[in-house]
Image (cartoon, rainbow, N blue to C red):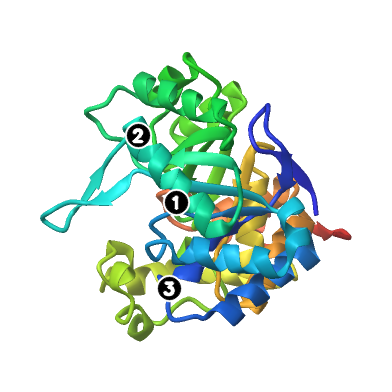
Amino acid sequence: MKQRSLGKHGPKISAIGYGAMSFSNFYGPTNEAESHAVLDRCRDRGVTHLDTSNVYGMGRSEDVIGSYLAKHPAARAEFVIATKASINRGEDGRNVFNNGRKYLEGELDQSLQRMGVDHVALFYVHRRDPNVPIEEVTESLVAIQKTGKIQGFGFSEIAPSSLRRASKVAHVAAVQSEYSLQTRSPEMGLVQTCAELGTALVAFSPVGRSMLTDQPLSHAAVQELGFLRFNPRFMSPNYEANISRVEAFRTLAAEMGVSAAGLANAWLLAQGDHVIPIPGTRSVAHLEACLQGEALDLTADDLARIEAVLPIGGRRATVTQRRNGLGPSATAKPRAC
């Protein structure tokens, strides 16, 4: 497995990590045995970066990681773990964001206890409280870092301007944001700013919550999942339009001899050495499909063909454009992992 840095001062980690939200039943029911099988395969394939949060299943994801580490002590030295805090439930049932140091450190302590570890490599502020200056939050994170409980810190879903402000206080190891061929907004400054500052860009939902796979969730399956059911891209008629839009991408992946999920992750890896996709899944087979992307070295022509069939905010390439070299072809060369 190729390696990338978790920020310019951070540890080396696998180029593709694993997003452990799937351990929490968020995308459908699972159990500890299935989750442990996924972690077994991560170790087999050299996936060393695990990403979780205190709110994934209200601690369930971290509990699963903790039970795995208890059964497999050697994995403690293999996995580089990131977790998050700041999302809390208000009295009215809505999410509220707490960026205070006491709260963050208290939640971190509970996360460490659930996982049975004394520190994590990375600790994110999951969402910003707009009422607290990001400089103040960064100072709190620096103070927590000095305790030894975290090796580095980051922010989830912040703007490039906020990252620059935080970075004037201390180095931000990573920013986490949804980023994929389906969600291109980080290209409006965040990808570039992270590269400039030596901050890793950790891309969650790299396969578009199944849209960029060979077997997208059916509309019926989506109706059983609370979050996706009310996500605009999965609501009719958007769902049907999106499924149709990515069909050419799935065809291209097949012609290149790779899974659609693998090609989607390979595309992200090609966006910069600081970009680290973290696909999440309950399935070992789907994990393998995602990891195919690590073995692809996409050429400029490959990237142009991907852009032609799934362009940012636009229509697919016309037949004439494809005849002029913008259509699919099998030029990506797999290499040994």
Determine if residue 184 is in view: no
Residue 209 at what x, y percent from top left?
45, 65
Q: Nearer the viewer, mark 3 or mark 2?
A: 2
Reading the chain from its start, which is encountered first: label 1 or label 3?
Answer: 3
Q: Which residue in the protein does label 2 denote?
A: 102
Q: Which residue in the protein does label 3 denote?
A: 27
Q: Nearer the viewer, mark 1 or mark 3?
A: 1
Amino acid type of the residue that numbered disc 2 sits on in the rendered structure: Lys
How many numbered callouts? 3
Relative to residue 100, is residue 72 depicted above or below? below
Relative to residue 118, is residue 211 depicted above or below? below
Relative to residue 196, is residue 39 depicted above or below? below
Relative to residue 79, is residue 168 depicted above or below? above
Is 182 on the left or on the right of 72, as rendered? left
Real-space Cα separation, disc 3 to disc 2, in angstroms: 32 Å
Is 211 on the left or on the right of 128, as rendered? right
Nearer to the camera, 35 or 209: 35
